[in-house]
């Protein structure tokens, strides 16, 4: 990394100087210090626009969707379906029917494991994931493999935390029935070459699932360009509410999959003799969905589009470079995850101090970070650390936030001196 | 206050934990695990009748959990099972009640500052939960969850 040796790293400017004002939660003091929120990989804050959209729904439009003939139900249905189209364009999916609303990326993965997986994975088949997966992209496949006597294969990574593409390709073969990898690692920040991964998997006839939970708030995602078969995201990690997420799937695959849950809205007709399932996407949306959350997510997409993902990406890249350079100057600090292609995550360990103590002391300085294994125990084990301290960025973070983090780390060193 | 949490005694015991070693001839050994932060410790107890004749631990954890385990081993060595369990109850009180009676806790009183940091109570109690299990023939692995 040449960053630390370059003397003048200019302070990047936020995409719009007023963006922070749109996030009411950022304007507060914690333990008497101004809040510095650096836990965006856990969840992002919500702009006023998203809060307003959800309030508007409950205060003015609240009604169930797809069933009432009355005005309110028509409004709710329209706003709900508009959100679907916004997501379709956001991901550049070919068709709105390929956008399925779920609770979050975790449910998206489970949906595919339970439906596609149960139907198509047989004894002796193989599922390939990477060594840097979040538990949510490990455990559903383990459950499936256990049930089907299938085999989970793990593609290795290097010391920087980059996937070894050659090794990954060697794991692919006639028995590979599914590949599932993370787009951006939550623990390391590594951006995986998912288009290349999809090409390799497709050469062996295996569909590809991409866990995009950590990607969509930071970079433009085009599912057609990536040519992935499934893509999952969580609304709350892209400035939307919790409890809403999206599963994208190619229509051809989704049509071949059995339903996930049975109930209202997912049927065309029901008799006690036979039930006919509804068409996409409703086949996978049983029961009254999270309507307010979906509308909030739609507003979050509008908000991101207003700023522009290209500007967000450029700004965050500069901020990450600045943060990396500042942290690398701190004696005894080791960054975990130094991939050449990296986004928004500064994960580190401090010699002689446990991350949990680092987190407590930073909190008292107003700096919110995550400490622990980040639901990615296997990858931390690979790096030989039980836990890290993780600062994760969003576009509303500034150079001053990084400086506060650095000052907090020096406070930690002082207490443990 | 941070200074109340990270008192000198705690920092000292976290850096140089006492009774920090394996014990091949232990009568009981039990693992404690805090899945929230990944803290893990293994506790060794040598019982002589009803008395904790010797006690030691190994493992990796934060300053609070390491210091707590270290001070616990110093405190309960030579005590009876019943005394050790009583000590645990008093220690738990110290961390969780508003006006605890810290009498009889001796050095353990340095953990009173943990009360102001609810997220860290589990760190301080991990070793004690593990000890309780070791003294009462419960599970082999203790979780604070």
Image (cartoon, rainbow, N blue to C red):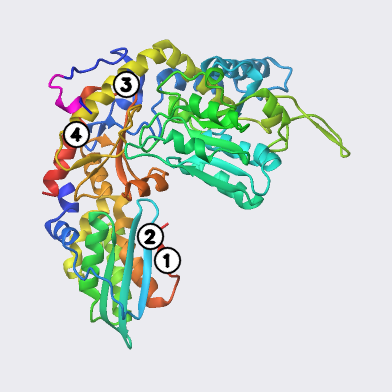
Secondary-structure class at tag 2: strand
- The residue sitting at 50% across, 29% down in the picture is A197
Is residue A22 a member of the stretch shown in magenta?
Answer: no
Label 1, residues with CA under 10 Å away: few <14, some 14-19, many ≥20: some
Same subunit, tags 3 and 1: no
Q: Front-most of A281 and B104? A: A281
Q: Nearer the viewer, mark 3 or mark 4?
A: 4
| Front position in the image: A249 or B81 | A249
Q: Chain of mark 3?
A: A
Q: Which mark is residue A394?
A: none
Disc 2 chain ID: B
**Whether label 3 touches label 1, CB < 8 Å:** no
* Camera-nearest label, 1 or 4: 4
Q: CA distance from mark 1 to mark 4?
A: 38 Å
A369 displayed left or right of A64: left
Q: Residues within 10 Å of mark 4 (few under 14, many from 20)?
A: some
* Measured Cα–Cα span from mark 1 to mark 2: 7 Å
């Amino acid at each position: 990394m040449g960053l630390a040796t370059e003397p003048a790293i200019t302070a990047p400017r936020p995409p719009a100087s007023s963006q922070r004002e749109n996030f009411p939660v950022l304007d507060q003091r914690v333990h008497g210090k101004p809040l510095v929120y650096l836990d965006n990989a856990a969840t992002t804050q919500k702009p006023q626009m998203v809060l307003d959209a959800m309030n508007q729904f409950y205060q003015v439009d609240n009604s169930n969707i797809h069933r009432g003939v009355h005005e309110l139900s028509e409004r709710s249905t329209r706003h709900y379906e508009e959100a679907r189209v916004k997501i379709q364009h956001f991901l550049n999916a070919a068709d709105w029917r390929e956008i399925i609303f779920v609770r979050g990326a975790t449910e998206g993965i489970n949906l595919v494991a339970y439906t596609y997986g149960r139907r198509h994975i047989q004894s002796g088949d193989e599922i390939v994931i990477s060594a840097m997966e979040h538990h949510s992209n490990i455990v559903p496949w383990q459950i499936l493999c256990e049930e089907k006597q299938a085999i989970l294969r793990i593609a290795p990574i290097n010391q920087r935390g980059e996937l070894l593409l050659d090794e990954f390709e060697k794991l692919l073969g006639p028995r590979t029935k599914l590949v599932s990898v993370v787009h951006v690692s939550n623990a390391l920040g590594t951006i995986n070459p998912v288009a290349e991964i999809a090409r390799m998997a497709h050469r062996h006839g295996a569909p590809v699932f991409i866990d995009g939970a950590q990607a969509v708030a930071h970079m433009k995602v085009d599912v057609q360009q990536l040519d992935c078969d499934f893509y999952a995201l969580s609304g709350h990690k892209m400035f939307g509410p919790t409890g809403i997420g999206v599963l994208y799937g190619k229509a051809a695959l989704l049509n071949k999959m059995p339903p996930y849950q049975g109930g209202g809205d997912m049927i065309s007709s029901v008799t006690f003799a036979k039930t006919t399932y509804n068409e996409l996407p409703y086949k996978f949306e049983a029961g009254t969905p999270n309507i307010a959350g979906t509308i909030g997510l739609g507003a979050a997409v509008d908000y991101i589009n207003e700023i522009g993902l290209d500007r967000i990406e450029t700004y965050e890249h500069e901020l990450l470079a600045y943060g990396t350079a500042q942290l690398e100057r701190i004696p005894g600090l080791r960054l975990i995850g130094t991939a050449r292609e990296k986004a928004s995550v500064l994960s580190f360990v401090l010699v002689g101090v446990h991350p949990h103590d680092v987190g407590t002391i930073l909190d008292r300085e107003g700096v919110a970070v995550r400490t622990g294994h980040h639901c990615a125990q296997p990858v931390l084990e690979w790096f030989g650390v039980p836990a890290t301290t993780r600062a994760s960025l969003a576009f509303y973070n500034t150079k001053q936030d990084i400086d506060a983090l650095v000052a907090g780390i020096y406070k930690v060193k002082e207490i443990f001196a | 206050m941070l200074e109340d949490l990270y008192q000198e005694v705690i920092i000292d015991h976290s850096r140089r934990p006492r009774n920090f070693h394996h014990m091949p001839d232990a009568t009981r050994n039990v693992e404690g695990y805090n899945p929230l932060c990944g803290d893990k410790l293994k506790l060794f107890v040598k019982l002589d009748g009803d008395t904790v004749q010797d006690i030691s631990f190994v493992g990796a954890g934060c300053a609070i959990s390491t210091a707590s385990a270290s001070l616990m081993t110093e405190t309960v060595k030579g005590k009876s099972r019943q005394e050790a369990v009583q000590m645990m109850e008093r220690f738990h009180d110290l961390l969780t009640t508003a006006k605890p009676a810290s009498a009889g806790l001796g050095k353990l009183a340095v953990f009173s500052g943990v009360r102001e940091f609810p997220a860290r109570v589990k760190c301080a109690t991990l070793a004690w939960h593990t000890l309780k299990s070791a003294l009462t023939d419960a599970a082999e692995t203790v979780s604070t969850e």
